[in-house]
Amino acid sequence: MKNLKKVLWATAILGLVICGFFVYNIYNAIFSPNTTFANEEAYLFISSDATIDDVSAQLSPLLDDVSSFKAVAKRKGYSNNIKAGKYILSKGMNNNDIINTLRSQNQPVKVSFNNQENLKSLAGRISSQIEADTLSLLKILNDDVFLKENGFNDDTKLSMYLPNTYEFFWNTNAEEFRARMKKEYDKFWNEERLSKAQALNLSPAEITSLAAIVQKETAKIDERPRVAGLYLNRIRKGMYLQADPTVIFAIKKETGNYDTIIKRVLYKDLEIDSPYNTYKNIGVPPGPITMPDISSIEGVLNAEKHDYLYMVSNISNFGYHMFAKSLTQHNRNKAQYIRWLNEQNISR
């Protein structure tokens, strides 16, 4: 009888030890720190088609014990419910904290773009900042049905994208990106701005096209309303805009090489047969020659009122222009500029 009691006590104690060991291991797997990175934070980008093995492989350099993470992930049901996005892990996190973070704390990213000359360039810029790749973005941005339904065409489609910094979730797809940009476009063209455009007898698309020329003509934000006022004066008088940046764009569009650098427009260039050549076509081009900043669009909508019709680069104040009301004065200003170009040996 005594031996039986001893056996029972020994069995009970052994059971408690085994149970304690088992509980300790479970507790340790769930609640003990499991990070190995030295920085205070680490970033994890999980793609939309990721599996638990993919996530574990990404976590491998960040964790002390990946196998314990996978075991806890399975127990908590995360393995079959992976959430795409950008996540921030903190130094010293345990597996429970990590999984809870990956379940519900998708972090937004800042997406910025500006001054792209075509949708291919825009798609490349965006694809470097969110999950959507360049090809899927290009397909969506160039979708003819969407363009037609929303009043855009092949020439004006770039005008829907307003340069700025926006918050997106990293796992945003191409269609979601486009929808957000259309929403931002509609919000920008509110009643007040539409009223100003109407007062100028220009549509939002024409305002954007003119703003793109202003953007290319001057990098000085404070000069943009004056440059815009000059072009509006020319439009009212039925004059050619004669903007060199439109000729440069026409050359790029014809060759398909948007990386071409042209510092000086030659007289022969002015003869290029293109609807974008404002030396041969009255009014604004059929679409923007670049993606204008909001400051350029506002510069057109709030253009300075004056009588200037001509301008040329100011060699005494680089970045700005010399303005003239008469062709005689302009020719004097232009002679100074041509002389300076020749002195700098700028031939193209």
Image: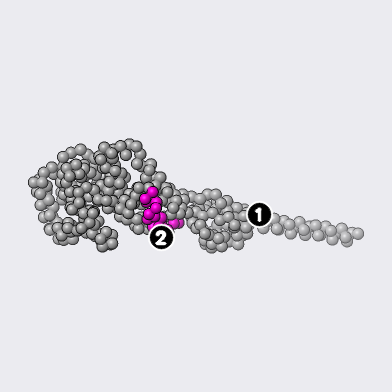
Residue at 28 percent across and 51 percent down: it is 287
Q: With respect to residue 38, does 320 lie above or below?
A: above
Q: Position of residue 27 (x, y in %)?
A: 66, 54
User: What secondary structure is found at the residue carrying circle 2?
Assistant: helix
How far apart, in angstroms, are the residues tagged by discs 1 and 2? 47 Å
- Residue at 17% x, 48% y: name it: 240
Main SS type for the magenta part? helix
Q: Which residue is disc 1 drawn over?
A: 27
Q: Which residues are magenta?
A: 130-149
Q: Is residue 18 left or right of residue 97?
A: right
**Can you tell which mark lies on residue 135?**
2
Image quarter in which the N terminus is found = bottom right
The amino acid type, in three-letter code, at marker 1 is Tyr
Which SS class for mark 1?
helix
* 301 magenta-colored: no
Q: Is residue 139 magenta?
A: yes
Q: Tell me the residue at 17%/58% (across/down).
A: 271
